[in-house]
Image: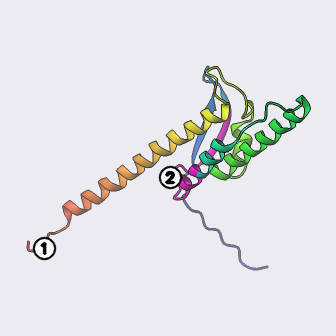
Amino acid sequence: MGESMKLQVQTGNISVDVEDERGEVIGRFQFNPADSNILKRYAGVADFFSRMSLDGDLPEEERLRQMDKLADDIAGQFDYLLGPGVAEGVFAQCGPLTVTKNGDFFFEQVLEGVGTLIESVTKKRLDKKMAKIKKAAAAAPRAGE
C-alpha cells in the first residue's frame, strides 16, 4: 500500500442553527457565507424562486404531486446554494412550503436570513482584511523618505 497523506484547510464554514420563534432549534446547517461563488449562486436561486408557481386549477391529487415536486426543487436549490445535504438540516422539522404566521413560505424566511448572514459575515471579513492592509500601508516606508 502507498503512503497516505492528508491536507487540512480552513474553509470559513460557519454553523447555523435554525430556530423557531420560541428560540428552539428546529434545524442546523453549515456553509461558508464568504465563498467567492456564493453571490452568483444566490442570484441564480433567487431567480429560480421568482419564476416558480403552483397551478391552483389542478385536481387535488395532481396539485399535491406538484407541491411535492416543488418542495423537492426548493430543497435542491438550497443544496446548490449552501452545499450538499443542507436542505435536510434546514427543513428537518418544517417543510419549505409551510406558510408562516406572516404569510410567507418558510423557505423564503430562511433564504432571506441566509442573505443577511452572507452580507454580515462578508462585510466583517472584508473590514478585517482592509484594516490589515491600512495598517501595513501606514507602516511601509514612503518613497523619498
Give the mark, 2 or 1, whose residue is nearer the N terminus: 2
Query: Does residue 137 appear to the left or right of 14 in the view shown?
Result: left
- Name, please, the residue furthest toward the left: 145
Residue 22 magenta-highlighted:
no
Q: Which residue is mark 1?
A: 143
Q: Nearer the viewer, residue 136 or 65?
A: 65
Which residue extends farthest front? 57
Q: Which residue is mark 2?
A: 34
Dot 2 crowding, Cα within 10 Å, few <14, some 14–19, many 20+: many
Where does residue 74 sit, x and y in percent of width and height? 72, 43
Q: Is residue 40 magenta?
A: yes
Expressed as whole percent of the image width and height from the top left, the position of residue 118 reads: 50, 45
Three-letter code for the amino acid on which mark 1 is drawn? Ala
Examine the rendered structure and indicate whether residue 100 appears above or below residue 44: above
Residue 63 badge: none
Q: In the picture provided, is 1 more to the left or to the right than 13?
A: right
Query: Which quarter of the figure has residue 144?
Result: bottom left
Who is closer to the viewer here, 81 or 97? 97
The image quadrant of residue 114 is top right
Q: CA distance from mark 2 to mark 1?
A: 35 Å
Label 2: element kind: loop
126 vs 95: above or below: below
- Residue furthest bottom in the image: 2
Give, as a single range, the part of the protein colored magenta.
Answer: 27-43
Q: Where the N terminus falls, by quadrant?
A: bottom right
Picture mark count: 2
